[in-house]
Image: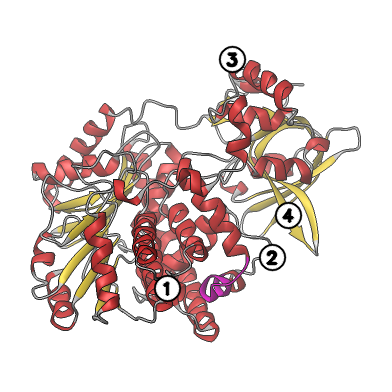
Amino acid sequence: MSDAGAGYLGVSASLTGRKWVGPSADSLRLAEAMEQQTELPPALCRILVQRGVAAEDVDRFLAPALRDLLPDPMTLLDMEPAAERLIAAVDRGEKIAIFADYDVDGGSSAALLLDWLHQLGRDATLYVPDRIDEGYGPNEPAMAELAASHDLIICVDCGTLSFDAVAAARGADVVILDHHLGSETLPDALAVVNPNRQDESGDLAHLCAAAVVFLVLVDANRRLKARGKAGPDLMSMLDLVALATVADVAPLTGVNRALVRQGLKIMARRARPGLAALADVANLSSPPSAYTLGFVFGPRVNAGGRVGRADLGARCLSTRDPHEAQSLAEKLDALNSERREIENAVRDAALAQAEDRGLDAPLVWAAGEGWHPGVVGIVAARLKEATNRPAVVIGLDGDEGKGSGRSITGVDLGHVVQKLAAEGLLLKGGGHRMAAGLTVARDQLEAAMERLSELLAKQGAGAHGPRDLRLDATLMPGAATVELIEQIEAAGPFGQGAPAPRFAFPDAKILHAKQVGSGHLKVSFGDGLGARLDAIAFGAFDSALGPAVMNHGGARFHLAGRLEINHWGGRQIPQMRLEDAARASE
C-alpha cells in the first residue's frame, strides 16, 4: 500500500496528530523481487529496499566486514606526523596530556588513547574542561599550564578552532584529533587530523572523533609492526568507538555501521569495567544495542559534563579497576537523575515558548533566563524530535546567551552556525552537521535566530511535515516472532541515518491496557484469531494516545511502532515499542 491520499491505512491524522506514510509502489515491487531471489522474509526485504540495498548486495550488507569497510588512515591529512609523534612520545617516555571534550565522544576518545598507552606501559594526564567555568574546547590558561609540565598535548573532539589556546601551549607539541568543522585556516599545531578540515575531501566527514582517534591508532599500530613491535589490541577498543558513534549521532551507515556492530559484540563481553558498571546501575538484563548506547550509557556518561564533574565520564570509561568503575558509575547515575529533573523544567518552558513562536518555521528555538547550559542540548534534541526541524535552545546569563542546537538529516547545522559566527551575529559558534554550540550577545539574539532560520531554509529545513510517521510494512501479531526480530536486527544497528523499521498492525483488538510508571502505557493486542502481542508506549499520556487506547471501549485500532525482544526471566519475548495509533474504520 502507498500513502497516497489519506495516508497509509487511511491514516491522515493519528492519535498523535500525524499522517502515516508507507512504502511506495516501486519499493514494494523491488521488495517482492528481492524476496523471490533471496528467500528472506517479506518484512526484512522491505526494510532492505528502503535502505537502498540491492538484492545482489544483501549478504554483504547483513554481514559487514570491518576489514572491507575501514578506510586507509593515510587518506586523512596529517595522519603521518600525528602517528609518528605519538609513537615517539611512547618510545622516549615523554609526558603526555590528553585534553578531551566533556561529552561521550570526547570521553570515549580519551579512553581510547589511555587504553592504547596503558597497553604499551605508558600513562597520560587527563584534562577535561568544566562546561560552565571553561566552556567548550581548549582554553589558554589550561593549555599553558599543561604545556609547562608535558611534552605532548593531544586534543580530542576539540581544538580545530582553538587558535589562541594552541598558541598558548608554548614548549609542548600539540596534536589535534577532531571532527568538528574547520575554518579556512588551522591552529599552529604539529598535526590536525580532522575529516572536516576545509582542505579534506569530505569522504570521511561522517566519522565521530573517537573513530578518528581509532584510525590514528590503527596507523600507529601499523608503524609499530613495521618496526618489529607488537601494538595494542585495537579490536578490544571498538566498544568505545561504538558508544561514541551512536551517542554523537553519527550516521549508522558504511564503516560507522560496521564499527558499531563489532563494538556491540565486544561490549557484550563486559570486559571494560566502566561499561559493565554502567550496565549494572541501569539494571540492564539484555545484550547491549544501539538504543542502549544512545539512551542508557550515553546520558550517564554525559551527566558528569552536564551537571557534575566534567571528567567523570572519561574516567569511568578508562578505569581498569572494577571497584572504581562501580563508584564512578553510581555517581554518574545519580547525576543523570539530577540532570533529568533540570531538563524537565527547561523542556516544558522551552516547548511552551517555541509553540508560542510557531513550530512550522525552518528553525525551532527558545531562550530562557538561567537555563542550565548542561541541558540545553538535550532539550534542543527533544524539540527537534517533536517538530522534525533543526532546534536551538539558549540559556541567557547577563549580556550573553550560550546555547546548543540539534539538526535533522540533510541539514548541516554546524556549517550554518559557523557562517553566522563569521558574519558577526554570533560571538562564537561551531560544531558538525547534526549538532552545534553557540554563544550570542543578548541584543543580537533575535537577529541571529532570524538569520539562522533563513540559512537553514535554504538547505530544506521546514520543507517536510513535522508529523509524518514513516512505516516500512504491515504485520499481523502472529508474525512478530523472535526469529523475525533477530533477522531484522541483522539489518541494523539502527539510529541516525538508519532509522529503526516501523511496522503497522492493522485492525488490532485491544485485549488489555493499563497505565504504568509515570505516564506509560502497557498493552496487549491481538488479531481476533488467537495471536497476541505485548506493547509498551512510553509517555503515552502526554498525548491522546494513552487515554484513547486505555479507554478503548471495544474499538479496534491500527497500531504503529518498532519491534524488540524483551529479555525477561531468562526468556525472550517479542514486544512492540508502540509509538502511534489510529482508530480503525468502523
The label number, if any, that marks residue 26 in the structure image: 3
Q: Which residue is the site of mark 1?
A: 115
Q: Quadrant of the C terminus?
A: top right
Residue type pointed to by label 4: Asn
Tell me if mark 2 has few (under 14), some (14-19) or many (20+) residues whose alpha carbon lies within 10 angstroms of its own. few
Q: Of callouts 4 and 2, which one flags the residue occurring earlier in the amino acid sequence?
A: 2
In this rendering, would 215 be left or right of 137? Answer: right
User: Label 2 vs label 3: CA separation?
Assistant: 41 Å
User: Dot 3: few (<14), some (14–19), or many (≥20) neighbours within 10 Å?
Assistant: few
- Kind of residue indicated by mark 1: Asp
Q: CA distance from mark 3 to mark 4?
A: 34 Å
Marks 2/3 in contact by CB < 8 Å: the verdict is no
Quadrant in the rendering for residue 507: top right
In the rendering, at what x and y percent does residue 299 appear? 47, 62
Residue 17 in the image, given as x and y percentages of width and height = 55, 32
Q: In this rendering, does residue 418 appear at all?
A: yes
Taking the image as shown, residue 150 lies to the left or right of residue 125, namely left
Residues at marks 4 and 2, CA–CA distance in whole angstroms: 9 Å
Quadrant of the image occupied by residue 570:
bottom right
- Mark 4 — residue? 566
Q: Which residues are magenta?
A: 269-278
Which of disc 3 and disc 2 is earlier in sequence? 3
C-beta proximity under 8 Å, tags 1 and 4: no
Where residue 408 appears, as percent x and y from the top left, is 39, 38
Which amino acid, by three-letter code, is at mark 2?
Ser
Looking at the image, is 482 positioned above or below residue 346?
above
Question: For the residue marked with disc 3, what is the amino acid?
Answer: Asp
Q: Secondary structure at mark 4?
A: strand
Residue drawn at point x = 35 percent, y = 29 percent: 462
Q: Nearer the viewer, mark 2 or mark 3?
A: 3
